[in-house]
Image (tube, grey):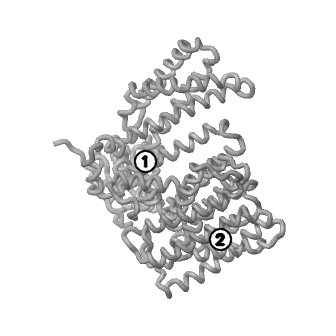
Amino acid sequence: MLLLLTFGIAVGAAVVFGGMVRRLAPAIGAVVPPRADRWHEQPTPTMGGIAIAAATLIGFLAVLLRPDLLPWLDTWLPVPIAAGAMFVIGILDDRLQLSPLAKLVSSLIVGAFLVFALSRSQPDGLPTWQTLLATVWFAGICHALNLLDNMDGLAAGVGLIAAAFVAWLLFDPLGPALVLLLAGLAGALLGFLFWNHNRARLFMGDCGSLFIGAMLAGATLVPVVGVPSPSLAPALFAMFILSVPLFDTSFVLVLRRLAGRPATRGGTDHVSHRLVSLGFSERSAVRILYLLGLAGGLTAWGVQWSGVDSMLPVTALFAVLIILMGIYLARVPAYDAGDFLALQKSSFAPFLKDLTFRWHAGQVMLDLILISACYYFAYRLRFEGESWENFRPSLTASLPIVLGLKLLSLYVSGLYQRSWETFGLRDLSAVLRGVGLGSTLSVLAAAYFYRFEGFSRLVFILDFMLLTAAVTATRASFRTMNLVAATRSKRARRVIVYGAGAFGQLLVREMRANPDWNMNPVAFLDDDPMKARRWIVGVPVRGGLGQLERTLVDDEVDDVILSTPAIDDLVEQQIRRVCNLHATAVRRFHMSIQ
């Protein structure tokens, strides 16, 4: 009841205070004008972080004076104090435009004092490395949330999800007072989304993003450095829960460095911006990152509930998802070609060029994770209970040689020379060769080094099946992502292809593969009754000429393309007459070799 009360009060307070800030901000010049490196088109009031911080504290004040919360004073009080300090720094930045160095130094100073205050419960203090990591973690999360505030509703929604999972999964080590404070933060963020969702009528500003980051960073440090018997498990949970801001920040910093751009130079090169560049709407891009945040939180819950060993395949799957998303989005254009001049002139340009444009290193790292996870999962499927404990030594002893042999086999099979974007049945043969050879060599190695004692044939069969499916799925994922991006694009012209034969299929494939065309094939029309009501290359065949007018209306079509010279003049005249009535352009596809 206290959690619900705190949450509800904070929601209402955030809505009320958000409206007040929105009205008062223009009077003091707290308005963000449209800029090339911003993601909005209208002047928008800012400093909504005032509403977030005020609503959080008001929701918490409703239960602050309860006597049973006083014993937790030393645990929770340093966290809101540190968040308040970062809030003040954010206010100064919103009004005076502090330099990136000043904000970094300030956050490290606040983080150092927070770690000092929390670690006083440790009788011998903290090891030096732990103090440094905790301080850097605090500053890093603050700036990660600050960088994540790049699209309407993104930082607030991700912060809401993170606050809920931190309070839920770390309830016991945090204590009731800090959990209630996080409930107030979650409620404040939900109320603020009333003003900040697309199209935003109020921005949170640096005072808001730094306050949210400080609250989350401080809360996640408490179980690690602020309790008498600290554990590193909460640190793992925190990394999963905060995977979205960590991923976005790491992604942007690495890509800017490779592009020869200053890390502190803003721009529309974040994960959310690249999703929009692929064709997703701003709302869809934000929802995708919400889902990624939920997936990270649920992964942390699974690890807490089942243990690291049992959840290793799931954590590996989540890591693969992050890596694939990073590899795919890094290919989306975000910089001018001139930004890579410094990269091309460097002494290590060949390596970085390969890493940037072909991603072979990323593929190898991905396969390392897949091989390890599939081999482990095959053992867990085969053995359980006492049997698992008996056969576990064979897994750990043989994993290094299995990794080496399977990577060698995948390389020899030619898999790394295959394009992910055009992955098909012919490429599947390379997967089968590589995985099959790796499994065969692994069996021979187990027989040679261990006389196959402590091993199971079924494990290697399961491993072959799992790794084949995993490698195939990751390679085919690029075609799937391209297809999803093409079909979800809000800017692409919706196209009917008249003629579902070889030319029409070729045309549809090129539309999906070539984003410069800016076309989304939504349907085929074909006069062959054998093709009607079927799907060809993933596009439905609506019927013949008689279905043209209905398809134009139902699918909101922009263009009709005649794909085959077999369409005679009489049919073409009928098509053009119907399209003219609906103001739809008609074009003809020509293909020739000269």
Q: What secondary structure is found at the residue carrying circle 1?
A: helix
Q: Quadrant of the N terminus?
A: bottom right
Mark 1 Cα-neighbour bin, 10 Å: few <14, some 14–19, many ≥20: some
The residue under the point 50% across, 76% down is 92
Position of the C terminus, as image quadrant, is top left
- Hey, which residue is sitting farthest front in the picture? 124
* Residue shown at 19% from the left, 42% from the top: 593
Is 549 situated above or below 439? below
Vertical comparison of 544 with 273: above or below: above
Residue 201 appears in view? no
Front one among 444 and 175: 175
x%, y% of residue 203? 52, 73
467 horizontally vs 575: left or right: right
- Residue under label 2: 188
**Viewer-proximal residue, 535 or 3?**
3
116 over 529 or under it: above or below? below
Locate residue 380 relative to residue 147 in the image: left or right. Answer: right
The type of residue carrying mark 1 is: Tyr
* Residue wearing tag 1: 328
Which one is closest to the eye, mark 2 or mark 1?
2
Horizontal and vertical percent position of residue 41: 42, 74
Residue lying farthest to the bottom in this orientation: 27
Q: Secondary structure at mark 2?
A: helix
Q: In the rendered image of this protein, does residue 274 appear above or below residue 455? A: below
How far apart are the two marked residues, 2 and 1, measured between alpha carbons?
34 Å
Q: Residues within 10 Å of mark 2 (few under 14, many from 20)?
A: many
Residue 213 at x, y percent in the picture? 57, 63
In this view, the residue in front, 467 or 255, is 255
Dot 2 or dot 1, earlier in sequence: 2
Q: Which mark is residue 402?
A: none
Q: Position of residue 4 (x, y in %)?
A: 76, 67
Q: Amino acid at mark 2?
A: Ala
